[in-house]
Every structure is written in C-alpha cells, then in structure tokens.
Image: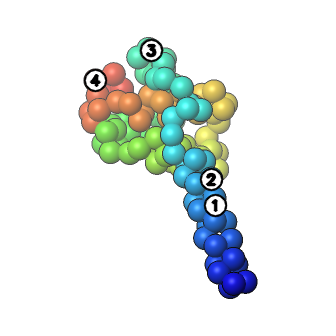
Amino acid sequence: MIKAIMKSAIYLSMAVTVSLFMAACGGTADIGPPPPDTVCVSLVNAKCVKCHYKTRICDALGTKSVAQWKRSIKFMIKQGAQLTEDEQNKVIACLSSLPKSSAIVCQ
C-alpha cells in the first residue's frame, strides 16, 4: 500500500514539473502580439544587424517557434546583445510571426 502511494506521489510530482516546464517554455501570452512592421524593421536593424547579416535572420524566419526565438534571443543577450525586456518581447513577436524571407525585414 505504501509503495502504491509513493508511486502515485512520484507520478504526480513529475506531471506537475512537466506542466510547469511546458508553461514556462511555450506560449505567447507574455510577449504579446507582433508590433507594427515599422517597429519590427527598426528593432531588427538596430539590434540584430549589429552582429548578423540580414540573410542569416531572413533564413531563420518561418522556421522557429516562439520558444525557439526566446532561446535564441536569451543566448544573444548572454553574448552581449543589449535589449530591454520590452524589446526582447517585441523582437520575439516579430521574428516568430514573419514568414520565411519576409519583405518586412529582408529588404
């Protein structure tokens, strides 16, 4: 009987952990909707093109989820990129919503 209770407790704690992890990694609730195109262009040109050619950015459009863009942006910040939290959310919203080779950013 105690083994069954312990086993249930372990499964429950694993389920809660996985749920919390998924909530933290996914979703778009905290980044908001994409800003206007002019804001996207301005942010990408000011923040991303400092270190990356536009072709690199454009090749990644349409291939990454919100969670993947979040990871990329967090990594860029660790590498020295300077973005406020608001700018991070806007860049993530822009890049995750644009299709591959979008004229908005790639021209």
Residue 70 versus residue 107 in the image, above or below: below
- State which mark lies toward you, 3 or 2: 2
How much space separates mark 1 and mark 4, taking CA atoms? 41 Å
- State which mark lies toward you, 2 or 4: 2
Question: Is residue 2 visible in this depiction of the protein?
Answer: yes
Residue 52 versus residue 89 in the image, above or below: below
**Residue 51, percent from left and from top:** 50, 41
- State which mark lies toward you, 1 or 4: 1
The amino acid beneath tag 3 is Pro
Task: Check disc 3 and report its element: helix, strand or loop.
Answer: loop
The amino acid beneath tag 4 is Ala
Q: Which residue is mark 2?
A: 20
Task: Check disc 4 and report its element: helix, strand or loop.
Answer: helix
Q: Tell me the crowding category of disc 3: few under 14, some 14 to 19, or many 20 or more residues within 10 angstroms, Cα based.
A: few
Q: Is residue 107 left or right of residue 27?
A: left
Q: Earlier in the sequence, mark 1 or mark 3?
A: 1
Q: Which residue is mark 1?
A: 17
- State which mark lies toward you, 4 or 3: 3
Q: Earlier in the sequence, mark 2 or mark 4?
A: 2
How much space separates mark 1 and mark 2, taking CA atoms? 5 Å
Tell me the residue at 60%/28% (across/down).
87
- State which mark lies toward you, 1 or 3: 1
**Residue 19, percent from left and from top:** 58, 54
Q: Is residue 104 left or right of residue 11?
A: left
Mark 1–mark 3 CB contact (< 8 Å)? no
Q: Which residue is mark 4?
A: 103
Q: Which residue is mark 3?
A: 36
